[in-house]
Image (spheres, grey):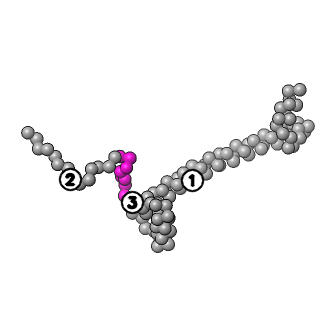
Amino acid sequence: MPKKVVRRGRPPLRDTDRRKHIMSVRVRPQLHALLQEAAETNGRTLSQEVEFRIEQSFANTEIAAQIGALERKLRLMETTVRKAFAIDPTLQRGQPIEELDEEESK
């Protein structure tokens, strides 16, 4: 008869709660103090604060990429509008779109 395995210690965490990698980082004392203060203010441990801020940096990178894409689309739209004004000088700058739609339907 096989022996029953007795596990000691606390039960293992779920995969979603488990930290899989340990990182050691050296920081200046001023940065450590800022992180510690932020962690206390936000009710996090120092490790949680560092992890949160690293995750935010990646989120900000994604947002910056989206803003860049929107800026490119806006420049394309501006170019298209300028070409439209060059083709049809009867268009009035600042004329509400509703008025343009009404004129086209006449």
Q: What residue lies at 49% left-to-right and 54% top-to-bottom?
A: 55
> Magenta region, mostly helix, strand or loop?
loop
Measured Cα–Cα span from mark 3 to mark 2: 26 Å
Front disc: 1 or 2: 2
**In this orientation, which residue lies closer to the viewer: 92 or 6?**
6
Please state which amino acid type lies under the numbered disc 3: Met
Residue 78 placement (x, y as % from top left):
77, 44
Dot 3 or dot 1: first in sequence order is 3
Residue 103 placement (x, y as % from top left):
88, 31
Q: What residue lies at 43% left-to-right and 67% top-to-bottom?
A: 26
| Dot 2 alpha-carbon crowd within 10 angstroms: few under 14, some 14 to 19, many 20 or more | few
Q: Which mark is residue 23?
A: 3
The residue carrying mark 2 is 8
The secondary element bearing badge 2 is classed as loop
Please state which amino acid type lies under the numbered disc 2: Arg
Measured Cα–Cα span from mark 1 to mark 2: 43 Å
Please state which amino acid type lies under the numbered disc 1: Asn
Q: Determine whether, in the image, residue 90 is placed left or right of residue 64.
A: right
Dot 1 or dot 2: first in sequence order is 2
The secondary element bearing badge 1 is classed as helix
Measured Cα–Cα span from mark 3 to mark 1: 22 Å
Q: What residue lies at 53% left-to-right and 56% top-to-bottom?
A: 57
Q: Which residues are magenta?
A: 15-22
The residue carrying mark 1 is 60
**In this orientation, which residue lies closer to the viewer: 28 or 15?**
15
Instruction: Verify whether residue 87 appears in magenta.
Output: no
